[in-house]
Image: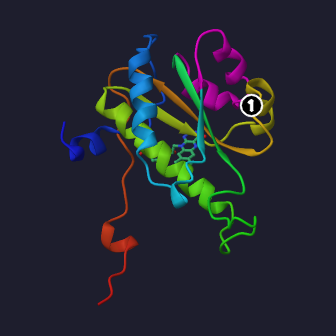
Amino acid sequence: MTFQEVLEARKSVRRYIARPVEEEKVCAMLEAAALAPSWKNSQTARSYVVRGEMLQKVREALPPFNQRNSENAPVLIVSTFIKGRAGFLPTGEPNNELGDGWGAYDCGLHDMALLLKASELGLSTLVMGIRDAAMLRGILNIPAEEEVTSVIAVGYAEEDTPARPARMEAAARSKWFE
Ligand SMILES: Cc1cc2nc3c(=O)[nH]c(=O)nc-3n(C[C@H](O)[C@H](O)[C@H](O)COP(=O)(O)O)c2cc1C
């Protein structure tokens, strides 16, 4: 697949078939995510890979509509980032006004690489930002120094899932200067 094909193959899938995801594919996704850039290479994004019997517990931290959207997905990846590092000086002071926004930014870059690798491997994904972070923290023993971002469903899509929604034209979301 060309990079353009990988980009165009990715879309949010909300209907999965009950087919296991190969462990090596999950490992390849995590390796791809490691190649993402990060603030001073601080690499603060973390992934909690949930499979098997733990799935049901983690699903309970999703609202009913996201439980339905990720039904049958055999892997859920809970994303977090370590607070107070990306975007911060060694003194602990924020480098600029964005503060931990940089940690969230890096986590997004990290997870996008993960999503695109999944797409290349024939897998489908759904990023879910609507989740109960406190519940996830308890279930997965996520330390207080980490902020929970999303839960990412990973699996094989049903046939004929809805198309990716329309996008704004590049011209409508960019300004050029010379
Ligand atoms: C940060 C973030 C949070 C999201 N949260 C949810 C969610 O809780 N439930 C859901 O069904 N989709 C969620 N989505 C998926 C978006 O709705 C989807 O990416 C968007 O509509 C564009 O569609 P596409 O991913 O198919 O290109 C989320 C996406 C992102 C990036």
Whole-percent x and y of residue 164?
37, 43
Residue lying farthest to the left in this orientation: 2
Query: Pointer 1: what residue?
Result: 136
Residue lying farthest to the front in this orientation: 90
Q: Which image quadrant is residue 21 in? A: top left
Whether residue 11 is visible, yes or no, is no
User: Is ligand 1 less than 8 Å from the beta carbon at label 1?
Assistant: no
Against 144, residue 106 (above or below) is below
Report how many numbered discs are placed on residues in the image. 1
Q: Is residue 36 magenta?
A: no
Please, what secondary structure does the residue beneath circle 1 have?
A: helix
Categorize mark 1 by other alpha carbons within 10 Å: few (<14), some (14-19), many (20+). Answer: many
Q: Residue at x 36, y 40 (%)?
A: 116
Q: Which image quadrant is residue 160 in? A: top left
Q: Which image quadrant is residue 122 in? A: top left
The magenta stretch spans which residues? 49-72
Q: Which residue occupies the foreground of this view, 158 or 78?
A: 78
Whole-percent x and y of residue 54?
67, 14
What is the quadrant of the N terminus in the image? top left
Q: Residue at x 42, y 34 (%)?
A: 31
Left or right of 162 on screen, residue 75: right
Name the kind of residue labelled 1 in the image: Leu
Q: Which residue occupies the foreground of this view, 121 or 144?
A: 144
What is the quadrant of the C terminus in the image? bottom left
Left or right of 44 on screen, residue 12: left
